[in-house]
Amino acid sequence: KLNIKVPKPKPVEEFLKPQGRFRHLFKPENRQVIDDIQRWVDENWKRITKLCGEE
């Protein structure tokens, strides 16, 4: 069971950008890394909601 239902999750960029340790990911040559992280988060969120019957 999910305790919190998130109608529209925020992009991972909003979480990573304020943290200076991820600054290197925002260089143009690393854009693919952020896209990969976002894809991973989206896939896992979908899997979790499906397991919880929230889909």
Image (tube, helix red, strand yellow):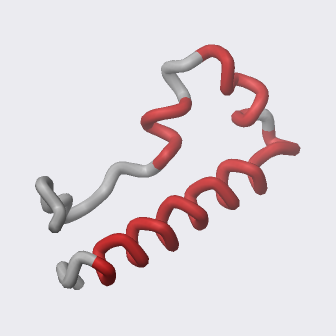
Q: Quadrant of residue 29?
A: top right
Tell me which residue sits at (49%, 46%) in the image.
12
Tell me which residue sits at (55%, 19%) in the image.
19
In the picture provided, is 52 more to the left or to the right than 32? left
Q: Quadrant of residue 48?
A: bottom left
- Quick check: 31 above or below 49? above
Tell me which residue sits at (74%, 35%) in the image.
25
- Quick check: 2 above or below 19? below
Report x, y in % for residue 32: 77, 56
Q: Quadrant of residue 21?
A: top right
- Which quadrant is home to the N terminus? bottom left
Q: Residue furthest right?
A: 29
Report x, y in % for residue 34: 67, 49
- Quick check: 55 above or below 27? below
Q: Nearer the viewer, residue 43 or 15?
A: 43
In the picture provided, is 50 more to the left or to the right than 5? right
Q: Residue furthest top?
A: 20
In the picture provided, is 37 more to the left or to the right than 16? right
In the picture provided, is 53 more to the left or to the right than 27? left
Report x, y in % for residue 17: 54, 28
- Which quadrant is home to the C terminus? bottom left
Tell me which residue sits at (62%, 15%) in the image.
20
Number of numbered discs on residues: 0
